[in-house]
Image (tube, rainbow, N blue to C red):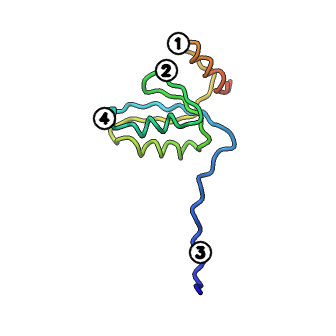
Amino acid sequence: MSLVPPIPKPSAPALLPRHAAYVVAFTLNGPPLGYTDFIDELRECDGWFNYIPGFWIVLTRRPIHEFAASLRQKIRTSDWLVVMPAKGPVDGWLPKPGWDWVNKHLTNEW
């Protein structure tokens, strides 16, 4: 019989109660094949938008600091990465399917 208390199992990361939209902007300076894990993580989000190279909008229930930390582990220190909340209104030049996605998933804050 052991008197040592059981070691608690690590809990799963807490998810947000609803999806958050994040802008993920990056410049990757290494060979493209070295970033498959990074791109796969973006594609595994619950929804994503990518019409412009190096610029994605993703939908996930993961908190921004956890999501960004996970992405940072998949790039080099010589690369650039910005992860920030995505909110509207938005303006620019995109094909109609791009605008349909943006208007459906981004909240207009003002």
- Foreground label between 1 and 3: 3
Secondary structure found at label 3: loop
- Which sits earlier in the primary sequence, circle 1 or circle 4? 4
Looking at the image, is mark 1 or mark 3 earlier in the sequence?
A: 3
Q: Are there few (<14), some (14-19), or many (20+) residues within 10 Å of tag 2?
A: few
- Looking at this rendering, what residue extends furthest in the bottom direction? 1
Marks 3 and 4, Cα distance to the nearest angstrom? 45 Å
Secondary structure of the residue carrying tag 4 is: loop
Quadrant placement of the N terminus: bottom right
3 or 4: mark nearer the eye: 3
Specify the quadrant of the image occupied by residue 2.
bottom right
Cβ atoms at labels 3 and 4 below 8 Å apart: no
| Secondary element at tag 1 | loop
Residue placed under numbered mark 1 in the picture: 93
Kindly identify which residue carries mark 3. Answer: 6
Residue topped by disc 2: 51
Are there few (<14), some (14-19), or many (20+) residues within 10 Å of tag 4? few
- Tell me how far mark 3 sits from mark 2, CA to CA: 50 Å
User: Within 10 Å of the Cα at label 1, are there few (<14), some (14-19), or many (20+) other Cα atoms?
Assistant: few
Residue 104 image-quadrant placement? top right
Name the disc covering residue 24, or none.
none
Earlier residue among tags 2 and 1: 2
Q: Residue at x 43, y 43 (%)?
A: 72
